[in-house]
Amino acid sequence: ARDAGTGAEAEWRGRLDTLYARVRGDTEALAAPLSAEDQTVQSMPDASPTKWHRAHTTWFFETFILKPNLPGYQVFDEDFGYVFNSYYEAVGPRHPRPSRGLLSRPGVAAVTDYRAHVDLAMHALIKVRERDVADLVIMGLHHEQQHQELLLTDIKHAFSLSPIDPVYCEHERAPETTTPVAPVNWQPLEAGIHEIGWREGDEAFPFCFDNELPRHEALIRKVAIADRPVSNGEFMAFIEDGGYRRHELWLSEGWATVNRLGWEAPAYWRRDEDGWSVFTLHGRKRVDPNEPVCHVSWFEAAAYAQWAGHRLPSEFEWEFAAACLPAGDALPDGPRPHPERLRPGMRQDVWEWTMSPYSPYPGYRAQDGAIGEYNGKFMINQMVLRGRSCATPAGHDRISYRNFFPTDARWQFSGIRLATDL
Amino acid sequence: ARDAGTGAEAEWRGRLDTLYARVRGDTEALAAPLSAEDQTVQSMPDASPTKWHRAHTTWFFETFILKPNLPGYQVFDEDFGYVFNSYYEAVGPRHPRPSRGLLSRPGVAAVTDYRAHVDLAMHALIKVRERDVADLVIMGLHHEQQHQELLLTDIKHAFSLSPIDPVYCEHERAPETTTPVAPVNWQPLEAGIHEIGWREGDEAFPFCFDNELPRHEALIRKVAIADRPVSNGEFMAFIEDGGYRRHELWLSEGWATVNRLGWEAPAYWRRDEDGWSVFTLHGRKRVDPNEPVCHVSWFEAAAYAQWAGHRLPSEFEWEFAAACLPAGDALPDGPRPHPERLRPGMRQDVWEWTMSPYSPYPGYRAQDGAIGEYNGKFMINQMVLRGRSCATPAGHDRISYRNFFPTDARWQFSGIRLATDL
Amino acid sequence: ARDAGTGAEAEWRGRLDTLYARVRGDTEALAAPLSAEDQTVQSMPDASPTKWHRAHTTWFFETFILKPNLPGYQVFDEDFGYVFNSYYEAVGPRHPRPSRGLLSRPGVAAVTDYRAHVDLAMHALIKVRERDVADLVIMGLHHEQQHQELLLTDIKHAFSLSPIDPVYCEHERAPETTTPVAPVNWQPLEAGIHEIGWREGDEAFPFCFDNELPRHEALIRKVAIADRPVSNGEFMAFIEDGGYRRHELWLSEGWATVNRLGWEAPAYWRRDEDGWSVFTLHGRKRVDPNEPVCHVSWFEAAAYAQWAGHRLPSEFEWEFAAACLPAGDALPDGPRPHPERLRPGMRQDVWEWTMSPYSPYPGYRAQDGAIGEYNGKFMINQMVLRGRSCATPAGHDRISYRNFFPTDARWQFSGIRLATDL
Amino acid sequence: ARDAGTGAEAEWRGRLDTLYARVRGDTEALAAPLSAEDQTVQSMPDASPTKWHRAHTTWFFETFILKPNLPGYQVFDEDFGYVFNSYYEAVGPRHPRPSRGLLSRPGVAAVTDYRAHVDLAMHALIKVRERDVADLVIMGLHHEQQHQELLLTDIKHAFSLSPIDPVYCEHERAPETTTPVAPVNWQPLEAGIHEIGWREGDEAFPFCFDNELPRHEALIRKVAIADRPVSNGEFMAFIEDGGYRRHELWLSEGWATVNRLGWEAPAYWRRDEDGWSVFTLHGRKRVDPNEPVCHVSWFEAAAYAQWAGHRLPSEFEWEFAAACLPAGDALPDGPRPHPERLRPGMRQDVWEWTMSPYSPYPGYRAQDGAIGEYNGKFMINQMVLRGRSCATPAGHDRISYRNFFPTDARWQFSGIRLATDL
Ligand SMILES: [Fe+3]
Ligand SMILES: [Fe+3]
Ligand SMILES: [Fe+3]
Ligand SMILES: [Fe+3]
């Protein structure tokens, strides 16, 4: 039946099945160091409990793939539609986001059961459904990978609020070196009209989200881009130079934010008599000047660029640069809980804020139905980040990828790369 | 000295040791139906996570008894002083109350270890210390019993916010009867000057908190007091008569509260096509008209009294009545998760709001030191409740007991008894 | 008709007419130094614009006296019922209190016309209506006098927020003296059961509000009361002794308020290199140590008493003391914008916080109808102040008078008198 | 030097002097219908009192022109720098914006004196200073014109909150016609690279703000633009079709805003039994279907475009269209308090929201010094509006003009013009 015997079909089914198992397993591996209590807390409305991430990604497969595509599928628990829907208005009402941390039940064990139930059905579905469903499965896996990154950044935020500095996992990295990171090299870009956006048939990146489409032309002006992000050491110079106290470096709303929230350094930094320490998923440690600065907001990125006499790149400049310039030394596979030390290249361990507001590409159309709510409805009052971070899962990033957050968000692994007009 | 061989000494040590073991065990029994996730959540600033209650009561013994009185005692974890101090300014800074639900660690298992560590030391202390420490131990146990009641009311509040109506434990009570509760009998009190407050040497109640002192004279006017609290059935008549929509029944701040919070019934009630259901620790069920109304605020109690043409008793009237009138049929021992059906008597399953603001008694003096913060510093902008509730542990209540909450608090098992001027 | 010819009737009509004219004129005199702009602003929800006070008191006469009692009376403007109703639910909906400062119209000139229109009708009514209406007119005048005091305290609060220290009127007082105020004399009170509340037929005080009734017995214990309020100089000693930084002096909610609002001194005080200055209706000036401390909250009064080793009197102690002890040297007639320097006596230039929550007297019943909302519905979560202040109009105060404000209110001329247990 | 005798110099001085007098007089004419009370109120943090606008624009001339450029100039009042600085950090601290409505002083008369004092000095300066100061004077006048528009929109907002529907001025327009506005004609634009931004030496528009620079190339795609804005009648069809209740038409943040604020129609609209009425500066009137819809937020503009199956133009498309297409029938000179009925053309009576976030043009540099805070520091989280409105003063608009407001702002005369991809 359904000709499972042919080699080509057997092959994609096999590959998809393996991929599904791997990505789903990665989530469980990330959650493994976290106790039931850890998986329950929510530290702010923007963050979610670990067990919610584990269940919501499962709900996504159940709701958008199993229910419409697997005849006879038995929904695990009808209540979960209300509890684990994130923001899909078309799917119905849902538990309010800021109250996710109030729900102790379903508990961690129930979530584990839920995942097993859905995984079983998904493996069955992959065996029998036509190829067209593969695209949806792959989308579900990319969705899960996004939540893997959030799982790490959300628990980091929660742990950072604890007076006892919890450790997610011990650091296995080599001890700190004193070799300073090399100065920035400025890489000029070729001015002109260039194509931007995901390219149909791209073998290196066979998947994209709808916000990377359509591929279209953009005008690139004369500009050079730094060959690496800003380091902690460079950012400390900004702080020492009064960066957080000089209004002329900030946009008006950024300056108001700095003063309202009392910012004096990137998130998780704390000054003591010995200088700066920083809370990480490996526990509290000294700030390493050779790591990329991260957990800065767009406001801080823009202020730093102003102070440095340069600017942030546009997302088009960034993407064009990533297409032309070297990715750099391979970093270890993600998701990892902390950035490596800096080395040159376009592929880094921190997301890079751009000067581009998150707007639809010319001719953009959201997908039909609930899945169309995935990206399109957020295209206002956010800024685009490009690249990836240490917390981004292997296989999830690509040069046309558009990440986006509001201008005051700091809990992602977000850093700064500079550009300069020529 | 330390003549543990004499019978009298052996006896009080033995009794104290047994009492300690029983009360501490009661807490664990109350927490037993709750998962690690359940024990972690905090649903509002006024409520605390179960594991926090379990640890804070333990910290109380460690801080106020073991550290000053048991030579060589090893503090379990120095960080716990910050995490589990509730409100004792004299003991030092502490984790902010509204953020108790953000702490996943120390987890439930660590709290269990903490309790075992302190229990061991406490049993040792009871064996060797002079009699004077017994008073402190007893106070610590009464403190723990207060938190047992809060443990139940706090988890009830948390569960009530869940869309899936969690069940703390199944109900074992007989099915609902249709025999209506008997009408109120009004019990006149003898007017005159009467003594109020805890009586030194009272054998029935060998312990009191400092707010029940000093015993003093109060003027009781001609008044009769109802022989039982208001029932759900009676309160439904108030609702049906537009009680929540008639401004003339409410104090100004009560009316503002009703409108701001959209109150239409006691907490946890919900109206559906079949009438009223109510969320309980046994799950959602129909409102039983023969149970005492509970989870009403002082504002609602006062509005109900206004509607009924009577008033709330003063705390002095209440205490004098409790000294003269029958306690009523013995109710099962507490703490229990839900009130029994109404029967006449002064000893009931719901706390009873009085018209008395929580003020110091004439000549009141708080104890010296940190322990003096226990009661005295809360003597403003709260109203006194008298009696007990189903959630009050056996042996914890007495007629001079003064409970107190702000006028809009509804999450305690708080009900209404009426008085009327003669 | 109506026998206006008899002397007795002519006399009370004449006296009432004169009294009406005087009180109404006093309001206009208080508003006279204020520009149209001054009369328009509202600095906080608790305060009201001057023109609102002028119009609301007029609306009171129109609504409660003219409309029901003067046949053919033409309402000045039907919209005013909505705009100038303060809190009478029974009279209908009204403009929200916090938004009174958003209304530029009706303007000051329209309010002046409104007052003239109502005054004309009131004089007509006083000429023709039976004696029974006199009580209502007198109540309306006492209401207007309460608003005269608020007019001063409200504009003081508004001016205090201005960076340019506006002056309401210049000070005409003699220059500061260096003679220090005499130390407190403690006046013992006779213990026993004493009558409290307004006495029917009291010739000195022919009027009272319903909250002063019924006269009833109260138990006074052995106590002495200070012969004068606390001075600025004495309060400065409290500040210098760390009064605002020592948690043990404060009730829990008071301590939270001090820290939330950053209080370091009474309202309107500011510390500079020369010591303390204070904003007054005469402009900013040095704090005079011989004036009574004022603009303190109940929390501050209670903390001061704790620091001084005494306590606040109960309102019954205060009233009994006022009945027995000398009023003191006559102070100039009010309303005046600032307290005189201290002298001994019970009749002072600052309201005196008591330890009594504002509760109904035993047997209290609010009047029927809308006017019953005047006092009764505020009897919760406020504390009683006794006496009077410099801003209280002549003829408005009496020893049974109960003023009341929440525990954090500071914008009234509120001070501290101590009592001490014997 | 200073050769005032030559004709050319006399001419520019004369023209500048006349222009100064006219613009300054226009402000006073706009304020003339407003009483002292009207000029004092502030209805929200985004709006300012009329007298503040009158004084702040005066402070701008005093601070940026007279003090540095007119030797011997006497500052009118040193305090005004604190009170009337809007947002210039470089000039020093200032009165908090949300509290402008708390200041009754300086009053309207003092502001009038201030204006006279500065006008006298400005006329003197215009007579004697070199030509270079003319640019600054012209900038000051454009600044004043911006505040003229705000003066109207701010008082409209304040009046709209009044329960008595104040009238700013009577309407003089012809009675409503039943001739419906003509259907939209779609005007195709020529695709390609076009120049955008203010053109140096443009005789029609001899002035621009720094945010219109530098002129630069932009890529215009195949698009057609509507020949007129959306009408009230068309917008009513959106409302009737459930526009405000269909989540799929809204961006996520827009949908949250609609629900949070309860929007059901444009600002100032109210539905009654006869349909829609709207509050205007001429008082409340029926909604005229042939007027342009206005007082819509960017969220509403975007939702309407989604519903209509089109989109908003980019600011580049708009500017290029304005350069190519007819301006339309001349509308009467502004500032006027209400839009005329619709007619085709690019020059309209409502500002037109674009899909362009307010970002710096490539190579943008803010001016040095405090004046550089004028525009640049607001270039984030706002959207560009193009065109003008009825409230825009004559001579103030130009096709390169960039207005900007946050996505939820509705109190400007902001409307919608559609574009459609070809
Ligand atoms: Fe998701
Ligand atoms: Fe406790
Ligand atoms: Fe009033
Ligand atoms: Fe300005």
Image (tube, coloured by chain):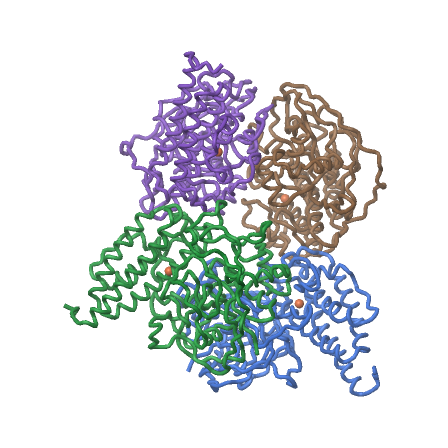
Chain colours: A green, B purple, C brown, D blue
Closest to the observer, C115 or D209: D209
Dividing the picture into quadrants, the one containing residue A145 is bottom left
Q: Indicate whether A37 appears above or below A247.
A: above
Closest to the observer, C16 or A92: A92
Please tell me how many numbered marks the rendered image carries. 0
Q: Indicate whether C168 appears above or below B316.
A: below
Q: Is residue C17 left or right of residue A205?
A: right
Q: Indicate whether D232 appears above or below C420.
A: below
Q: Say whether residue C152 is visible.
A: yes
Residue D44: give x, y in percent of width and height. Answer: 60, 59
Residue D187: give x, y in percent of width and height. Answer: 47, 84
**Residue farthest to the left, as pictured:** A1
Residue at point 64%, 23% (across, down) = C195
Residue D219: give x, y in percent of width and height. Answer: 49, 82
Residue at point 73%, 57% (across, down) = D105
Closest to the observer, A233 or B387: A233
Residue at point 39%, 73% (across, down) = A365
Residue C402: give x, y in percent of width and height. Answer: 64, 34
Q: Is residue C275 left or right of residue B355?
A: right
Q: Say whether residue D183 is visible.
A: no
Dividing the picture into quadrants, the one containing residue A121 is bottom left
Dividing the picture into quadrants, the one containing residue A133 is bottom left
